[in-house]
Image (cartoon, rainbow, N blue to C red):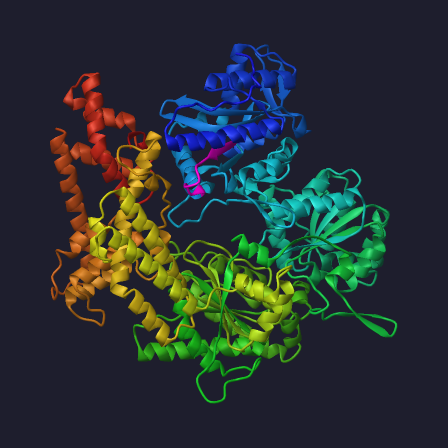
């Protein structure tokens, strides 16, 4: 059938839900035709897709392949590895023809993506061995399927549609791995009103996993960051043929080290375009205001690499202002593209690379200090060159002085207010300077002065970089949920004379408050914190006081578990160039180290010794950088539960002065204790350490301010909120006060009660089991999830009063909450299994409601940071011994386990074991553990034994078969055949017997795998 450009007409008679989706599809294809896409009604199956691809491939590469060659080509390029396919799509590849001659080919026109053909197909069915998926709409670029669009009706949550795509991709033998669909780069999901897009990826970067660390999802926006979510408008802006080609070729990044595809966010793309246009038109300098945590390194990497191919530019230097950032940025750049920047170990290496004609030396990451040393005739290194009878570095660089060189400065307000800026401008008159900053310097927050004659002039970011090219403020980022809001608790000590703004409290009082509030702030140590102090002496004193106060607390209460405290500040430089460079952006530490250098050095040695004892490390003050890196790594690796990363390895609080308050990111850091005066950009930078997004368990960044700095916070919000007014920005930046959230919790619980009443049931956990039908169960899940979300938010408020706590307990008593959590987990697990079965079958079956298919479940909100396997074993032992403060009844113990998502796959076993225990029996924790292991082994054996009996199999053989699967986490079809062989059945009877056995074994294997995937098992699900 020849290509058709006729308009797509929807099928007339279909069920109502399908009609809605078909109407959306019909209108959308018409929209793409209006954008000059060719509609191909003839491509509905795999053969037609491959036939079309062959025509386009042969035309592009001016070649005619034999059938055998084409089959071999397909075999070569189709791969289950998304990253390999993405590289093949963007590369010139090699193929050997039947006569032995080489063929260098591309799949699309990679030089000019606009010159490719753009086609749209719909309702494509790809039938493979185990999969019969149908795809709503696909965009083909030069015959290669590059974009999949899933269209849903308004009622369906787009996140559920995304989850379905993830589940389809995990199906064995799916079309994504064995056909041309392996080249899909981009998924778009829309219910017409809300449109989202996200990159394709291999399984480990493409999951909605148990911790709900989701794949990155994007909504499109214009240059002013206004969201474009309506499908037609989205198509007009995002799916214009050339724009889509650019998005895939230029603005997706292949992260080599992680084998991962990364989409650039709209604001990152606009910033890169502005820089590239500014250079292309040679129209001066500019700066990008992108808030902390918005991915400035990726933006600058992409700008730098695009400049690599600009013949008018001699070099592109990415300039940072601290040695640790030099390393960090270099690692980030090389993460995006392996080996794209080398380490500049010294000034001589930097000069050599600046003079090199090698393409790999066109983009260089360096520190501003290293560059300054090269350009300073009086620097030690230049004087040494003269002494050795060699040309100075500055003289060697002379040939570059009239070349066009681009400088991109990270956190430009730090590195640019100094002599180095003038040296660069004077030496490279044709240079273009671009700055990235999360917190620009305006007149209000400028502190450095430039003197011109008699008059003092404040130096702002605009003074240096001329104009703002693009802005993406913290207000935008919070609205986009790219960073979190803040909860600020201005700590007011009890007493007659509270301190005034900026005044310090007694350190002992601060530590008492921290010890009282830390578990609340960090969700029972699920996260970690920084304590920002005003001076090195304060940091030293705090470190010692924490030790003595925690020791005293432990003596008074043996059950108290001390916090792991670390402390980091830079040592006196003593001529060490690395430490000097590190201190460029640490003004307080640099100044403090001028006094009593020896005292500070010996205090830091004692802090290091304490750290080494606690963590079994061997750090010394002479290699301070290694210690600093270790502290950062522990903060970043925190994780939970402790089974993932033991508590002994963690740092709960890191005491700092200037360090870690800028340029440091960790998703597991959620709290900042403030005992220093902060204002403007310093305040925003420090607060922004806490607001990296993780999942539902981290609703906001927590700030505990011990210096009553509300006026400073308000002033900083007003200055950095962009176009929003101060009051409007405050409502965006700051979470609601506790009474407001308590009112919302009350409303959510009332809504849950109204729903239960509408079902003729009381609002009690027990009544949930009496809900009739999946619609009702789905409604309960939605209602209670909102209750739990608000409760999680309140659980981390450090400023709840006794009245607040009483009100919360009145609205939702703790016992009721725990019961409802257990009911939620049981109901959600049941519906989730049902949903998975529906997805495998492609359609909802029987009476299962559409509501169930649309549900997205959250389990991470239902996993306590405190309650883990060890904790439960300890409780069981105390119950058995009938002693200890935590006396619990059997029912209370079981309720605790049923309410925690971590035990979802083991809840029945643990509950059954608890029922075998007797109070006062006096079993130790070791005996409890041993008893539980034996109980499980016997229970599992009995379960398998009864299955073996029902299916006439030898129990030992079935046991060995199951053990082998769980050891390797691979389902082996041949082993199943061997297991069934003694039954001596014909092929048809054996197939039926295998299916009957697997129907019982699949849930058992899934449960025992405890959330891990068993490869190949899903074919039987």
Answer whether residue 81 is visible to the viewer in this image.
no
**Is 595 placed above or below 88 here?**
below
Q: Quadrant of residue 843?
A: top left
Question: What residue do we see at 41% from left, 69% from top?
Answer: 739
Residue at the right extreme, as displayed: 453
Foreground of the two, 937 or 946:
946
Residue at the bottom extreme, as displayed: 496
**Is 608 placed above or below 899 here?**
below
Question: What residue do we see at 54% from left, 19% from top?
Answer: 73
In the rendered structure, the answer to whether residue 708 lies left or right of residue 805 reads right
Q: Position of residue 439 (x, y in %)?
A: 65, 61
Q: Is residue 176 magenta?
A: no
State the extent of the magenta-drawn residues as a range. Answer: 146-158
Q: Position of residue 357 (x, y in %)?
A: 77, 40
Q: Position of residue 79 (x, y in %)?
A: 48, 27
Quarter of the image with the C terminus is: top left
Q: Quadrant of residue 519?
A: bottom left
Foreground of the two, 679 or 372:
679
In the rendered structure, the answer to whether residue 558 lies left or right of residue 244 reads left
Q: Is residue 156 magenta?
A: yes
In the rendered structure, the answer to whether residue 768 lies left or right of residue 390 reads left
Q: Position of residue 944 (x, y in %)?
A: 16, 38
Question: What residue do we see at 47% from left, 59% from top?
Answer: 634
Answer whether residue 356 is visible to the viewer in this image.
yes
């Amino acid at each position: 059938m020849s290509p058709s450009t006729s308009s797509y007409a929807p099928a007339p008679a279909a069920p109502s839900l399908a009609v809605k989706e078909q109407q959306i599809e019909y209108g959308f294809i018409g929209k793409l035709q209006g954008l000059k896409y060719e509609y191909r009604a003839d491509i509905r199956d795999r053969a037609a897709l491959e036939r079309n691809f062959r025509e386009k491939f042969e035309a592009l590469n001016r070649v005619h392949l034999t059938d055998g060659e084409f089959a071999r080509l397909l075999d070569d390029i189709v791969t289950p590895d998304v990253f390999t396919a993405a590289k093949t799509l963007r590369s010139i590849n090699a193929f050997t023809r039947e006569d032995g001659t080489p063929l260098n080919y591309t799949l699309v026109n990679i030089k000019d993506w606009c010159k490719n053909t753009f086609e749209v197909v719909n309702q494509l069915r790809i039938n493979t061995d185990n999969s019969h998926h149908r795809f709503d709409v696909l965009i083909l670029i030069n015959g290669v399927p590059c974009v999949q669009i899933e269209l849903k009706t308004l009622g369906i949550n787009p996140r559920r549609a995304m989850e379905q795509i993830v589940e389809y991709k995990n199906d064995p033998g799916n079309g994504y791995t064995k056909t041309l669909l392996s080249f899909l780069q981009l998924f778009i999901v829309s219910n017409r009103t809300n449109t989202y897009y996200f990159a394709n990826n291999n399984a480990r970067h493409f999951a909605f996993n148990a911790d709900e660390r989701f794949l990155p999802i994007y909504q499109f926006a214009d240059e002013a960051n206004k969201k474009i979510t309506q499908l037609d408008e989205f198509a007009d802006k995002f799916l214009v043929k050339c724009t889509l080609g650019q998005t895939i070729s230029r603005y997706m990044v292949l992260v080599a080290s992680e084998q991962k595809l990364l989409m650039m966010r709209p604001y990152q793309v606009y910033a890169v375009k502005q820089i590239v246009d500014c250079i292309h038109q040679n129209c001066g300098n500019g700066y990008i205001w992108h808030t902390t945590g918005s991915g400035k390194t990726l933006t600058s990497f992409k700008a730098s690499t695009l400049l690599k191919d600009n013949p008018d530019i001699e070099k592109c230097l990415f300039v940072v202002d601290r040695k640790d950032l030099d390393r960090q940025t270099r690692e980030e750049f090389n993460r995006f593209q392996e080996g794209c920047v080398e380490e500049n170990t010294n000034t001589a290496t930097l000069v050599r690379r600046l003079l090199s004609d090698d393409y790999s030396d066109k983009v260089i990451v360096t520190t501003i200090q290293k560059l300054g040393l090269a350009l300073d005739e009086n620097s030690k290194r230049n004087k040494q060159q003269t002494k050795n009878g060699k040309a100075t570095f500055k003289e060697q660089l002379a040939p570059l002085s009239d070349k066009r060189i681009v400088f991109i400065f990270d956190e430009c307000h730090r590195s640019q207010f100094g002599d180095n800026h003038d040296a660069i401008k004077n030496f490279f008159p044709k240079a273009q300077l671009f700055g990235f900053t999360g917190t620009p310097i305006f007149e209000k927050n400028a502190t450095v002065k430039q003197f011109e004659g008699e008059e003092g002039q404040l130096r702002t970011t605009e003074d240096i970089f001329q104009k703002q090219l693009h802005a993406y403020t913290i207000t935008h980022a919070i609205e986009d949920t790219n960073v979190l809001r803040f909860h600020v608790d201005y700590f007011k000590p009890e007493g007659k004379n509270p301190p005034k703004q900026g005044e310090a409290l007694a350190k002992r009082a601060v530590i008492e408050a921290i010890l009282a509030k830390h578990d609340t702030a960090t969700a029972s140590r699920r996260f970690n914190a920084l304590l920002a102090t005003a001076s090195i002496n304060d940091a030293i004193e705090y470190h010692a006081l924490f030790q003595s106060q925690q020791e005293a607390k432990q003596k008074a209460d043996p059950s108290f578990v001390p916090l792991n405290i670390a402390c980091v500040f830079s040592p006196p430089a003593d001529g060490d160039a690395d430490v000097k460079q590190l201190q460029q952006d640490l003004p307080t530490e640099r100044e403090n180290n001028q006094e009593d250098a020896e005292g500070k050095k010996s205090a830091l040695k004692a802090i290091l010794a304490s750290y080494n004892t606690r963590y079994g490390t061997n750090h010394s003050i002479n290699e301070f950088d290694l210690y600093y890196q270790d502290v950062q790594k522990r903060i970043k690796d925190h994780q939970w539960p402790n089974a993932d990363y033991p508590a002994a390895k963690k740092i709960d609080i890191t005491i700092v002065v200037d360090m870690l308050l800028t340029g440091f990111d960790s998703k597991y850091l959620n709290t900042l204790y403030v005992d220093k005066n902060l204002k403007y950009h310093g305040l925003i930078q420090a607060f922004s350490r806490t607001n990296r997004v993780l999942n539902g368990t981290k609703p906001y960044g927590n700030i505990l301010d011990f210096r009553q700095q509300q006026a400073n916070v308000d002033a900083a919000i007003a200055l950095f909120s962009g176009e929003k007014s101060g009051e409007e920005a405050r409502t965006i930046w700051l979470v609601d006060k506790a009474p407001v959230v308590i009112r919302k919790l009350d409303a959510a619980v009332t809504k849950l009660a109204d729903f239960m009443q509408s079902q003729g049931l009381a609002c009690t956990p027990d009544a949930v089991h009496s809900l009739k039908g999946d619609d009702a169960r789905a409604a309960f899940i939605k209602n209670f999830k909102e209750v739990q979300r608000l409760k999680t938010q309140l659980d981390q408020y450090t400023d709840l009063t006794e009245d607040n706590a009483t009100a919360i307990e009145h609205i939702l008593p703790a016992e009721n909450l725990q019961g409802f959590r257990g009911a939620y987990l049981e109901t959600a697990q049941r519906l989730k299994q049902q949903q998975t079965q529906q997805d495998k079958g492609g359609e909802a079956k029987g009476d299962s409601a559409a509501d169930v298919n649309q549900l997205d479940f959250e389990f991470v909100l239902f996993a306590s940071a405190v309650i883990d396997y060890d904790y439960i074993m300890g409780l069981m032992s105390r119950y058995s011994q009938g002693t200890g403060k935590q006396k619990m009844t059997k029912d209370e113990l079981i309720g605790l386990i049923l309410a925690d998502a971590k035990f979802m796959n083991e809840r029945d076993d643990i509950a059954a074991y608890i029922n075998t225990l007797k109070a006062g029996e006096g079993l130790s924790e070791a005996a409890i553990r041993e008893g539980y292991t034996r109980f499980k082994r016997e229970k599992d054996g009995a379960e398998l034994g009864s299955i073996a009996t029902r299916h006439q199999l030898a129990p030992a053989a079935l046991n060995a078969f199951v053990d082998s699967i769980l050891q390797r986490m691979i389902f082996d079809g041949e082993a199943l055949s061997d297991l069934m062989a003694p039954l001596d059945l014909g092929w048809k009877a054996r197939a039926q017997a295998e299916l009957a056995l697997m129907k019982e074994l699949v849930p058992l294997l899934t449960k025992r795998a405890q959330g891990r995937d068993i490869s190949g098992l899903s074919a039987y699900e």
